[in-house]
Image (spheres, rainbow, N blue to C red):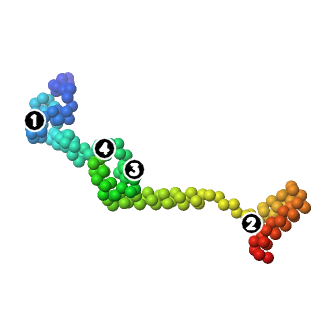
Amino acid sequence: MPRPKTSKKTSVSKSDFIRSQPATLSAAEVVAKAKAEGIKLDRVLVYKVRIRQKGGATAKKAAGPKKGVASKAAFVRELPASTPAKEVVAKAKALGLSLSVNYVYNIRGAAKTAAKNRRATARAGVAVPRPISGSPAAESLLKALAAEIGLGRAIEVLSGEQAKVRALIGR
């Protein structure tokens, strides 16, 4: 026959219990007090909860940047490029972000390179009409055109174009 459980169920979580204790108590004393109240915990948990409560390194990593900043790079890009790098670092520090002057220069340089690449791609994307070379397809197109507008009219058009080319060349 199984034994009935004798542990008391508390409505307070372990972390809440630790936070409710004075900071002057040592971790061992907090564990002893918790044991007396039927809460089972260890010193490591006491240390972790207290570090998070103080806003230590672990808490900062878990919380991320303050005031809704998506990322460090986004923060740098949001500021005008005319803002000095040292000023950007100071503003970031006020928001809880740690970055260096070199990081600011790297992000701004990458943004310039990306903009330059976008401009080059935009120029390269423009289609330039090219004359059809002397392929069999071009000849068949010329024959079809002559059949459509008539042979006499096609010869007149070609003669006019030939005159324009000679005028440009200087013959």
Identify whether 162 is placed above or below 78: below
Estimate how packed mark 2 is, as few (under 14), some (14 to 19) or many (20 or more) residues with alpha carbons within 10 Å.
few
The disc labelled 3 sits on which kind of residue?
Answer: Glu
- Which residue shows up at 86% across the image and 59% down it? 146
Name, please, the residue furthest toward the bottom.
171
Residue 41 rendering spot, x and y as whole percentages: 17, 36
How crowded pointer 3 is (Cα within 10 Å; few <14, some 14-19, many 20+) is rated as few
Residue beneath disc 2: 133
**Label 1 SS:** helix
Q: Label 1: which residue? A: 32
Circle 3 or circle 4, nearest the eye: 3
Q: Residue at x 13, y 34 (%)?
A: 21
Residue picked out by circle 3: 78
Report the Cα–Cα distance between label 1 and label 2. Answer: 93 Å
If you read the primary sequence from the N terminus, does the residue marked by circle 3 or circle 4 appear first? Answer: 4
Where is the C terminus found, in terms of image quarters? bottom right
| Residues at circles 1 and 2 in contact by the CB criterion of under 8 Å | no
Which mark, by number, is residue 66? 4
Question: Which corner quadrant of the image does residue 59 belong to?
Answer: top left
Query: Where residue 30 sits in the image (x, y, percent)?
Result: 11, 36
Check contact, mark 1 vs mark 3: CB within 8 A. Answer: no
Q: Residue 159: x percent and y percent?
A: 85, 67
Residue 16 in the image: state x and y as whole percent: 19, 33
Secondary structure of the residue carrying tag 2 is: loop
Choose the circle earlier in sequence order: 1 or 3: 1
Earlier along the polypeptide chain: callout 4 or callout 1?
1
Amino acid at circle 4: Lys
